[in-house]
Every structure is written in C-alpha cells, then in structure tokens.
Amino acid sequence: MDFALSEEQLMIQQAARDFAQNELLPEVIERDDAQRFPAEQVKKMGELGFMGMMVDPKYGGSGLDTMSYVLVMEELSKIDASASVVVSVNNSLVCYGLEAFGTEEQKDKYLTRLASGEIIGAFCLSEPEAGSDATSQKTTAIDKGEHYVLNGTKNWITNGGTAEVYLVIAQTNKEKGHKGINALIVEKGMDGFEVGPKENKLGIRGSDTHSLNFNDVKIPKENRIGEDGFGFKFAMKTLAGGRIGIAAQALGIAAGAYELALKYSKERKAFGTEIANHQAIAFKLADMHTQIEAARHLVYKAAWEKDNDLNYDLSGAMAKLYASQVAMDTTVEAVQIHGGNGFVKDYHVERLMRDAKITQIYEGTSEIQKIVISRSILRD
Ligand code: CAA
C-alpha cells in the first residue's frame, strides 16, 4: 500500500495552499460578512486550472486525477469554503456530468468554456418539496417534439446567480417514476428563465445560492443529456463523485480549524503556561488530529477508487458522512480552544464552524449517506 503523493500532486497541493493564503485569506471575513461572491478569485482559479481539473485538456481541462482535485479542495477549504464550493460544483457536478454523459456537440459548446473557468455552471436538482427525495421532482419538462417545455422551481442552487450554464433535472413522464426524468442544459438568458433572490445563509455566505424559476422555457432536444429518461441516473452518478468533493471540503474545513487551534494553543497563556500544556487542551488536539487523519484516509481512498475505475458510491458516501461529522466536531472544539476569541470573527474559527454545517446537508444529507451505505452493505 502506497500512501505517498506524487511529485505532481505535491506541487498542485502547494499551489492551492499558496493561492488560499495569498488570494483567499485577505478578504475572506469581509466577503463572508457582505455575502460577496469571490468573483475575482474564481477567475484566478480558472487561470490556475482549478475549475476543470479532471477534464481532458482537449475540452479545456487540466487532465489531472481525482486525488489532485481532492488535495486542492482540501487546501482551499481550510481558508474559504465559499470559494471551494464553487470549485466543487463546477468540477464534480457540471464538468464531470457533461464530460461523462454529454454529446460531442454539448462538450464543444459548453464544457470547454466551463472547464477553463471562462464561465461557471450550476447543478439543479433540489426543489421546495424535493430535496432528499430526489425522484419526486415537480419541475416538468414536457416533450413537444423538437423541444421540451420546462416549468417549475429549483431551490438552494449553488452558483445560482453567477452561472451561465445550468444542468436541470426535470420530470418528463410522471408515470414512469425515476425512468421518466431528464437532465437538460439550460442557458442563462433563455426566455422564461428567472433567477430568484439570493439566500441569506448561516455559512458559506460568500457563495451564491438562489432559487430558480422556469416558466415555459423552450429547451432544444439537443440539450438533453443522455437517452430519454436518463436524468435520475445522471443525477445519482454525478452526485456520487460530487460527494467526494464535498467530503474533501469538510476535511479541509476541519484541518483549517485544527491548524488555527494548534497555533493558538501554543501561543495563548493561562495559569502560567501555554494552554497546550494543559491536558484539557492537549487531549482535544489529540482527538481532533486523530479524527482528521481518519477522515483524510476515507476521502483519499474514495478518490483513489475513482481514479482506478472502481465503484466509489460506498466509499464516497462514507467519506462524506464521516468527514462532515469531523468538520462539525473539530470546528466546535476549535472555537472552544479559542475561548472568547473564538466567538469573534477575526480569529476565523467561528466562520469555519458555520461553514462546516452545510457539509452535512448538501449533495445528500448525512441521513441520505446512511441510506446509500446501509443499502450497499445489505446488498453485498
Ligand atoms: N449510480 C447509478 N444508478 C443509481 C445510483 C448511483 N449511484 N443510485 C441509484 N441509482 C439508480 C438505481 O439503480 C435505480 O435504478 P433501477 O430502478 O434501474 O435499478 C434508480 O436509480 C432509483 O434508485 P433508488 O430506488 O435507490 O431511488 P430512491 O428513490 O430510493 O432514492 C436516494 C435513492 C439515494 C435516496 C436518492 O434519492 C438520493 O441520493 N437523494 C439525495 C439527493 C441529493 O443528494 N440531493 C442534493 C442536491 S444537489 C446539491 O446539493 C448540489 C449543490 O448545489 C451543492
């Protein structure tokens, strides 16, 4: 078993670490406060090749492996999870979905610009009444021969206001259940497509989350991804990889909070010594370090399975379930170690704690991951 990263992976990890320190850190508190999208930073991440990391260079991507992507997600998320979720959705859901299942025409028209970071994309599955229960889509895409007519509302859509390309999951034939669902490519500016107001969120406040309304939007047939009725499987297969990205985000949030807590506990003095010398704090650091390392093993294993063309549904779900719990536990403890300072924004850990929560909710809640995991172990 080889746990060593390659020279190339180490270089990419360092590039992401430098970018996070130099470009994300300076205004991260202000962006969080003002709910400001990291537009400039996203543009620079496109230039660095972070927006289409696993996409074939012939479609504008970086042609790297999932492991490199996970390393980048981890480093960015240590500093700014609002920026890293943009990277995650664009890479894992939008670019992957188009590269794996799109036609050559769709790849030429959309993927190249998405992978190079020229534009960003959004993945639209959740609805006001269908989040976890993803087969219960109320959004309809009615087949009119040459085109579909799309009607409905999507909720909590990451990149909702800033995206140019939206992959929308909608019901074409209700009688057929999950086999009557399609995935359609929708462009910003299509007649009848409206972006709703921005959500005011607990965490990842710099990311751009909106509802979307579709009123008789005409979608050409060539914008359907895959065969008629493939939409639900498209969503499941795409989300399986997405969960590795969010697991890496959770890992990064946890590691970022731990690094801050470790540094603080070696500087802050109480009762005549640095607080790290008190067992109450040292034991917290020991637990955090151990849990983060365990989460890292799960996340890297899932990435390794994807890179080796193995099935990663189970490992991705376990990685997301565990890493998101570790992100919550670690960030809460990091605030505790910082005491009163942990409760104010300048010390960063309160933001990481707020950001951690969403990793237990989006791209499949922890309860959904347990459904995926339990079904897998009971089936085998
Ligand atoms: N790969 C391929 N096919 C899959 C699959 C996978 N990973 N998972 C399920 N399927 C297939 C099944 O094989 C089945 O097909 P057949 O009938 O042909 O065998 C079909 O899909 C239906 O599967 P289930 O019967 O298991 O469906 P279900 O209704 O019981 O739901 C579920 C399964 C796992 C709970 C699913 O609904 C689910 O994952 N829900 C959560 C959705 C989710 O993650 N939402 C997050 C929103 S996206 C987001 O957050 C993005 C963002 O902006 C950050």
Image: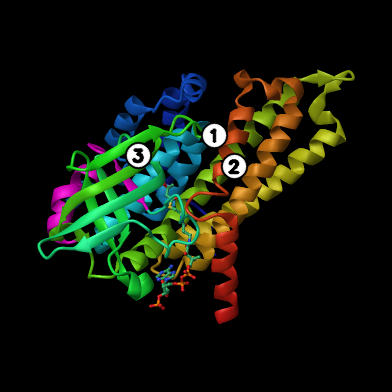
Q: Quadrant of the N terminus?
A: bottom right
Snapshot quadrant of residue 337:
top right
Q: Quadrant of the C terminus?
A: bottom right
The amino acid beneath tag 2 is Lys
Q: Position of residue 16 (x, y in %)?
A: 42, 36
Foreground residue, 187 or 337? 187
- Mark 1, secondary structure of its residue: loop
Q: Which residue is mark 1?
A: 203
Mark 2: few/some/many CA within 10 Å (<14, 14-19, 20+): some
Give the number of callouts. Answer: 3
Residue 160, numbered circle? 3
Q: Which scheme is used to colour this image of the protein?
A: rainbow
Snapshot quadrant of residue 220:
bottom left
Q: Position of residue 91 (x, y in %)?
A: 34, 48
Marks 1 and 3, the one that precedes in the sequence: 3
Snapshot quadrant of residue 280:
top right
Marks 3 and 2, the one that precedes in the sequence: 3
Q: Report the residue at 76% width, 20% height from top.
A: 268
- Mark 3, secondary structure of its residue: loop
Q: Is residue 289 left or right of residue 352?
A: right
- Mark 2, secondary structure of its residue: helix
The amino acid beneath tag 1 is Gly
In this rendering, does residue 62 appear at all? no
